[in-house]
Image (cartoon, rainbow, N blue to C red):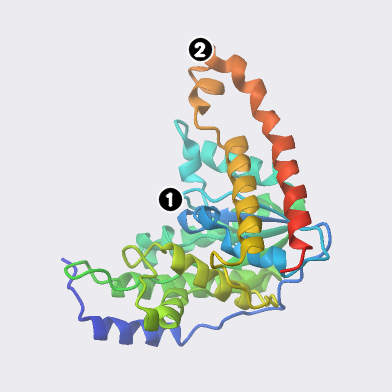
Amino acid sequence: MIRALHPQSALAAFLLLAGTLPLAQSAPLDLQDGDRVVFVGGTFVERMQQFGYLETLLTVAHPDKHITFRNLGWSGDTVWGESRALFGTQADGFARLIKDVKEAKPTVLAICYGANEAHAGVAGQQRFIDGLNQLLNQLADTKARVVLLSPYAYRPGPPGAPSPEAYNSVLKSYCDAISKVAVKRNAQYVSLFDLLIVVEENVRRNERPVTENGIHFTQSGKRLAAFEIAKRLGVDVPELDFGKANEHLTKLRAAIHLKNELYFYRYRPQNETYLFLFRKHEQGNNAVEIPQFDPLVEEQEKVIAKLKTLRR
């Protein structure tokens, strides 16, 4: 049985853990003209597409450079590609993960795993690190620069919810292990362990919730988290107001959202079973339409390129 922790005690434990972690362990992210940044991870990464705040910030921060982004996040995923297996095996999911990343042609890989794996406890840590190294080994021939983002700790949930104290303690050891992998591989490491508490402190005066349940960010939480992540990446982001009054920024973020939506349909069509799997004998002839998303994605990237150079 998990004992519920008093909120103040939980907060103190959280701060004690967070205080031992560095913000970044290597040089700032230096995006170059022509870079393709590919985000890979689980639910947190996948939901970045929902409002597009981080991609918008990184786009606006480099108005004179042609930089494109692809989001390959998949809810519930792990370094073994388990969520991507669909009706196949774990090996099939991992093969798909590698295939999707390589087809995205990354020059920069931003990888965020460990949140789901940490539920296996300390005993599962070495298996996770082995899996992370295997993933990085398989993607080494992309020659992409690697940024390892740590997962973030949970906050105490509503009254009666289990305390996240034990999980956060385990997660910290996973974050430490990820940082060591980054050192060995000369990759950039960015700790997001305390991300939720930092975001919450920034918004507390306005009394707007930043999470749905102590785990997943709300829209306002995602916006504040994007600024914090960009800062920890070492990106010089201008002061921006995402409010409705900023028509230009609203259009840019809408274009980024549409581009991501089109790309999502390209690499994860909703009716995959009928197009490519065991029911393709019924509608497999429609699979020829999937590559037709490519020019639509490219068209939106032209819109993004035009909008980011206009006066903010």
Q: Which mark is residue 209?
A: none
The answer to whether any part of residue 107 appears in the image is no
Which amino acid, mark 1?
A: Gly
Q: Residue at the location (79% across, 63% down)?
A: 309
Q: Earlier in the sequence, mark 1 or mark 2?
A: 1
Quarter of the image for residue 137 reads bottom right
Q: Which mark is residue 282?
A: 2
Taking the image as shown, residue 270 lies to the left or right of residue 138, namely: left
Quarter of the image for residue 261 reads top right
Q: Residue furthest front?
A: 245
Q: Relative to the observer, which residue lies in front, 297 or 126?
A: 297
Q: Residue at the location (58% across, 41% down)?
A: 264
The quadrant of the picture occupied by the C terminus is bottom right
**Crowd rating for badge 2 (residues with CA inside 10 Å; few <14, some 14–19, many 20+):** few
The answer to whether marks 1 and 2 mark residues whose Cβ atoms lie closer than 8 Å is no
Q: Residue at the location (27% across, 69% down)?
A: 157
Instruction: Report helix, strand or loop for mark 2.
Output: helix
**Crowd rating for badge 1 (residues with CA inside 10 Å; few <14, some 14–19, many 20+):** some
Residue 8: x and y, percent?
25, 86
Quarter of the image for residue 102 reads top right
Q: What residue sits right under mark 1 in the picture? A: 76
Which amino acid, mark 2?
A: Glu
The answer to whether any part of residue 236 appears in the image is yes
Residue 189: x and y, percent?
62, 72
| Distance (Cα) linking label 1 and label 2 | 30 Å
The quadrant of the picture occupied by the N terminus is bottom left
Taking the image as shown, residue 264 lies to the left or right of residue 64, namely: left
Residue 162: x and y, percent?
22, 67
- Front disc: 1 or 2: 2
